[in-house]
Every structure is written in C-alpha cells, then in structure tokens.
Amino acid sequence: MYTEHFGLSEPPFKIIPDPRFLWYSDQHKEAKAKIEYHLEHKDGPVYLSAEVGLGKTSIARRLRDELVNDKSKQVAYAFAPNLKTANQFMRFIADEFNVKTARSYAQTLRNFETFLLEQFEAGVSPVLLVDEAQNLPRDTLKTIHHLFNFATYNEFLIQVALFGQPELHKRIQRFRSLSSRMYMAKLDSFDLDQTREMMQFRWTVAGGGELPFDQEAIEEIYRLTSGIARDICKLANETLLRTVIENHQTVTKTLVLRAVSDAFEEVK
C-alpha cells in the first residue's frame, strides 16, 4: 500500500530475517567477525547472546549463506525448537551431514566421530549453526559438549556456533564444563544514531531515497522501541501505513503516536 505512495520497490520494514535488510552496526560487525574467527581457526565453539529482535537470526543465516560457498566447509543449520531430545538432535545433525544413523544414540555418535575423522583427513571442516539455542534441553547441551571432545592436538574437528536469547548465556554459565570451553559474542539494542542509520539503510535497500521520517519521529520511534531492531521495524511499518491513510508525505511524531497502538499491544 505505502510502497507506491513513497516510490519503493518493496516494503523496507518487514520483520522476517531477510539478510539483504540486515544493517551491520559496529557491534553486529564485531559479533560476526568474532564468530567467523573462531570458526575459521577451529579453536573452540562460540555462542551469540542477544534479546529478541536484535538480529542474531539474520547473522546466523548470513553466516550460513556465506559458508555454504566455502568448499573447505560443510555446513548444517539447526532450529533448536524442532529438536526436543538429545537423540533427535544427534539424528538431525547426522542426517544433515549425510552420516548413517543407528537405532542407538551411542552408535550414531560413533558413526559421527568416524565421519569427522574422514572430513579432517580430506581437509574439510564441518560447521554446525544452531539458532534459538536457548531452547535446547540440558541433555542436548551435554551432547554438544561431547562433540567438543572430537579434536586433534591443535583444532576441533567440528566447529559449533550457537545463537540464542540471554537465557542461553545463563544456561551455559550454569554448565561450568561447557562455559569454560565456549567463546561468547553479544548484541545490545541500538542507540538513537544507529536507529536512524538502520532505518535509512533499509529504506535505501527497498529503493527509496531520503528517509521521510523527520527527526522527532525517529526520536519517538527510538523511545518507544528502546532501540530493539524488530520493534523499530514494526512501528515504522505501521507508521508508514498511517501516513498513507492520512495522505501525508512526511512522517511526523504525531503519526508515530497514532500508529503505536497498531504495532504493540502494550504502549510503552
């Protein structure tokens, strides 16, 4: 509806994690670079902790899309809520890496170890990316911990990166033998300048020119969303709809305030 009004090729503030619309703040660049470093140097598993809506899934998918083009890597991407038990988890990653599964968990694990040794000899590094990892049951975390035992004297045979909400950090810290072997990266909410830059970036990707939100509108969006990227997008989207309905060309603070109840059940 508003794309024609503003001359856009597509909506700029969709909340689905489309990698094209991922704006890399300095902290996003740092988190991604840290994960890439540990995956490349095979020196230990890593996890990314962030609140809902800050871009961790977009980073995970961007990494997956980049790594699948690396012939020295073999990548599996898991969505944790679909994996309710350690056995399901082990069978899933075995299937993803084309490893023969067995009825017993122990035999599947042995088959996987054989696979890792074969890949090591072939110069290929298996990489496992797990999204929404805060949902993994403790037994599955134990399985992941067990995977870290598959290593040579100077490198791990499988590289693991977990992506999850802050609960993941708390769970890993409670699992002392796991936390001592994992590196951590994190994302925080945007500040006002980052909010403006992210909105302008997405607007440009969608085919727009100068952002139609005035300064007060951006400040109000930042205040109402606390700099959470997904909430920024939801509110910006609803505000643009409100702007078209009321036939305006410039998005003002007043329009933001009129749209906020459409974006959120509870107004902040």
Image (cartoon, helix red, strand yellow):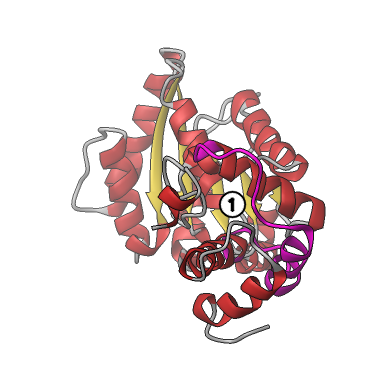
Residue 148 placement (x, y as % from top left): 55, 42
Q: Quadrant of the C terminus?
A: bottom right
* 183, 194: nearer the viewer: 194
Count of residue discs = 1
- Of residue 21 and residue 249, the one placed in the foreground of this image is 249
Element type where label 1 sits in the image: loop
Quadrant in which residue 178 is drawn: bottom right
Vertically, is 21 above or below 171?
above
- Per the rendered image, the range of residues in magenta is 205-231
- Mark 1 crowdedness (10 Å alpha carbons): few <14, some 14-19, many ≥20: many
Note whether residue 75 is visible: yes
Q: Which is nearer the eye, 54 or 164?
A: 54
State whether residue 241 is above or below residue 63: below
Outermost top residue: 122
Residue 222 occupies quadrant: bottom right
Residue 101 point in image, percent of width and height: 22, 43
Q: Quadrant of residue 122?
A: top left
Relative to 187, is 83 on the left or the right? left
Between residues 141 and 166, which one lies in front from this camera angle?
Answer: 166
* Residue type at numbered disc 1: Gly
Is residue 159 in view? no
Residue at 50% x, 58% y: name it: 142
Q: Is residue 221 magenta?
A: yes
- List the residue tagged with mark 1: 55
